[in-house]
């Protein structure tokens, strides 16, 4: 099996406690000057000034069960990517799981580096 293509960084995800979520969103817009691109009840995505199609967003999440600063790589197929990395000694920490936009899984390599792989096949 060929290595999967990590197409781009989709987002960098930061968590905040649910009670602080409204203040954190306001902070990212007013203090950091980022434009809110989208919002769900427990997440919001922000555009950096030079954001173009294919350039990573900053995502705030009130879901506290993910590591801080988790990088999400966009791939063609999460399931195939997980299979490939598993065959090469990576640990599947979580998933694959269906989410509103596709599928996601968290993977860890032998050095403890965790990252998510994400597809929009949903």
Image: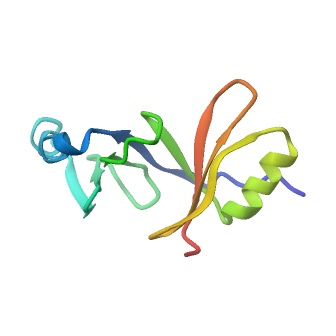
- Measured along the vertical axis of the image, is residue 19 above or below residue 39? above
Asked where in the image residue 45 lies, by quadrant, the reply is: bottom left
Position in image of residue 70 (x %, y %): 48, 39
- Measured along the vertical axis of the image, is residue 122 above or below residue 66? below
Question: Please, which residue is most extreme toward the top here?
Answer: 111
Question: Please, which residue is most extreme toward the right here?
Answer: 1
Q: How many marks?
A: 0
Which residue does the image show at 25% across and 61% down from the upper left? 41
Position in image of residue 79 (x %, y %): 72, 63
Q: Quadrant of the C terminus?
A: bottom right
Which residue does the image show at 44% across and 42% down from the upper left? 65
Q: Quadrant of the N terminus?
A: bottom right
Residue 85 located left or right of residue 31: right
Residue 65 located left or right of residue 6: left
**For this rendering, which residue is in front, 112 or 49?**
112
Residue 31 located left or right of residue 103: left
Which residue does the image show at 24% across and 45% down from the upper left? 18
Position in image of residue 49 (x %, y %): 26, 47
Residue 89 located left or right of residue 30: right
Figure coloring: rainbow
Which residue does the image show at 43% across and 52% down from the upper left? 55
Position in image of residue 2 (x %, y %): 86, 56
């Amino acid at each position: 099996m060929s290595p999967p293509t990590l197409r781009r960084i989709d987002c960098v995800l930061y968590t905040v406690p649910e009670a602080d979520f409204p203040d954190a969103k306001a902070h990212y817009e007013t203090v950091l000057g980022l434009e809110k691109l989208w919002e769900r009840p427990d997440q919001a995505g922000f555009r950096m000034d030079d954001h173009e199609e294919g350039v990573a967003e900053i995502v705030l999440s009130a879901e506290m069960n993910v590591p801080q600063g988790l990088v999400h790589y966009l791939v063609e197929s999460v399931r195939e990517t997980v299979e490939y990395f598993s065959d090469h000694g990576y640990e599947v920490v979580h998933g694959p799981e269906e989410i509103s936009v596709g599928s996601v899984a968290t993977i860890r390599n032998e050095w403890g580096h965790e990252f998510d792989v994400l597809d929009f096949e949903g």
